Amino acid sequence: MMRFLSGVMSVLVFSAIAECFLPWWSVAVISFIVSLLVNARPGSSFLMGFLGVALLWLLVSFWHDVANDHILSTRMAMLFHLPNYSLFILVTVLIGGLVGGLSAWAGALLRPAK
């Protein structure tokens, strides 16, 4: 359990640092590397990467959304024909979580079986 939580926090923290300097897809590389280093099963690694990136993107999108009074997310929701800005943020968080989860899963599957 501690290994799982430390993996989630590692993905979150290192992805936050990487996204300051690198493109958005750097979260996939971070999730992949953390999954290689943390010795967890593939299903647990997927959940670790998913939660780490999803929490990061939720915090960042919420931070920016509140700062501009929901203007940008409301316009983006209208662009994608979504009923409200909350659903747009949810879709964003799910996409980020899937990117992190699938790359962490790939990292866990790359490790040799014991």
Image (spheres, grey):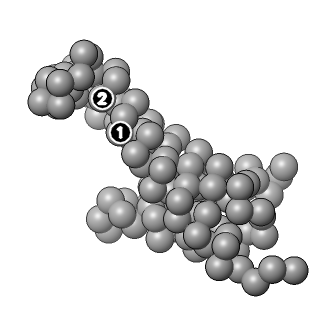
The amino acid type, in three-letter code, at marker 2 is Phe
In the rendered image, residue 59, in percent from the top left (x then y), is placed at 44, 36
Which residue lies at the image location 17% right of the left edge and 24% below the top edge?
81
Is the residue marked by circle 1 packed among few (<14), some (14-19), or many (20+) residues within 10 Å?
some
Disc 1 vs disc 2: Cβ atoms closer than 8 Å?
A: yes
Q: Quadrant of residue 111?
A: bottom right
In the image, residue 8 above or below residue 38: above
The amino acid type, in three-letter code, at marker 1 is Thr
Q: Please state which of residues 94 and 19 is positioned toward the viewer in this rendering.
A: 94
Residue extending farthest to the bottom is 112
Decide if residue 31 is on the left or right side of residue 17. Answer: right
Residue 108 in view in this figure: yes
Q: Please state which of residues 51 and 94 is positioned toward the viewer in this rendering.
A: 94
In the image, residue 111 above or below residue 45: below
In the rendered image, residue 17, in percent from the top left (x then y), is placed at 44, 61
Which residue lies at the image location 29% right of the left edge and 34% below the top edge?
64
In the rendered image, residue 88, in percent from the top left (x then y), is placed at 30, 29
Quarter of the picture holding the C terminus: bottom right
The residue tagged 2 is 88
Secondary structure under badge 1? helix
Distance between mark 1 and mark 2 Cα atoms: 6 Å
Q: Please state which of residues 11 and 111 is positioned toward the viewer in this rendering.
A: 111
In the rendered image, residue 25, in percent from the top left (x then y), is placed at 36, 63
Residue extending farthest to the right is 114
The residue tagged 1 is 92
Secondary structure under badge 2? helix
